[in-house]
Amino acid sequence: MNLVIVRNYEEMSAKASQIIGTLLKKQPDAVLGLATGSTPIGLYTNLIKMYENKEISFSNVKTYNLDEYCDLPKEHPQTYFQFMWKNLFDHIDIKKENVHIPDGNTANHEQACKEYNELLKQIKIDLQVLGIGSNGHIGFNEPGTPFEQETFIVKLSENTRKDNQRFFASLSEVPQYAITMGIHNIMQAEKIVLLASGKAKAEAIKNLVEGEISIDFPASVLKLHHHTIVIVDEEAASLLNK
């Protein structure tokens, strides 16, 4: 696991976009695993600028998102479907058929999990973008999730729902369930880039970098991956032993 400490959120976003930009220039048909939440917005903004400057194209890129809330209609502003189109896809030349996001708005969630998992088995993600939750979750893999877990329906912890409450009017509106890639799916990626910014992520980054590998802290599995880059700003790195 390669740790990169930068000054601030802007430098974190720029560093991540450089890594993805380099990949797309070398491999225009790359497969990207994408994340949502506030952390990767700067990354996506930079990728849009690189596209507008004709440095990169997404015309042959395929994307697979980590997760999606259950039982929110696609039109709901807080679905990850809406997030991705608003913050990235609407602004680049990606083909709609090359975008893959779990279907959480279905009567049969188990079938949706199975179908998404089958899609993931048929491809190789060249680069997976991750954030990290305060309890160490990656995707929506909460503490206690087995490392061999594949795509599944997860009951979100109160900790995670409170972390996401800022995107909703109240905690009661935050969905209780989501479909997520499992840890096993994430670990199949050729390269993983995890991003963290701000003091609120400092404890999680300390546990990731200095703690033991344990299912009680899901992100710790990344120490077993052959090519993981962790990019954090100074605030997120503030609790690390220097």
Image (cartoon, rainbow, N blue to C red):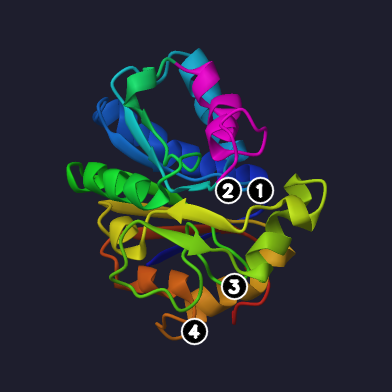
**Residue under circle 1?**
9
Image marks 1 and 2: residues in contact by CB distance under 8 Å: yes
The residue under the point 49% across, 84% down is: 211
Q: Earlier in the sequence, mark 1 or mark 4?
A: 1
Q: Earlier in the sequence, mark 3 or mark 1?
A: 1
Considering depth in this image, is 43 or 78 the residue closer to the camera?
Answer: 78
Considering depth in this image, is 9 or 168 the residue closer to the camera?
Answer: 168
Measured in 3D between alpha carbons, the distance from the residue under mark 1 to the one under mark 2, in whole angstroms, is 5 Å
Q: Residue 206 at x, y = what percent? A: 58, 77
Label 2: state its secondary structure. helix
Q: Earlier in the sequence, mark 3 or mark 2?
A: 2
Q: Amino acid at mark 1?
A: Tyr
**Residue under circle 2?**
12
Q: Amino acid at mark 2?
A: Met
**Residue under circle 3?**
135
**Residue under circle 4?**
211
Q: Nearer the viewer, mark 3 or mark 2?
A: 3
Measured in 3D between alpha carbons, the distance from the residue under mark 1 to the one under mark 4, in whole angstroms, is 24 Å
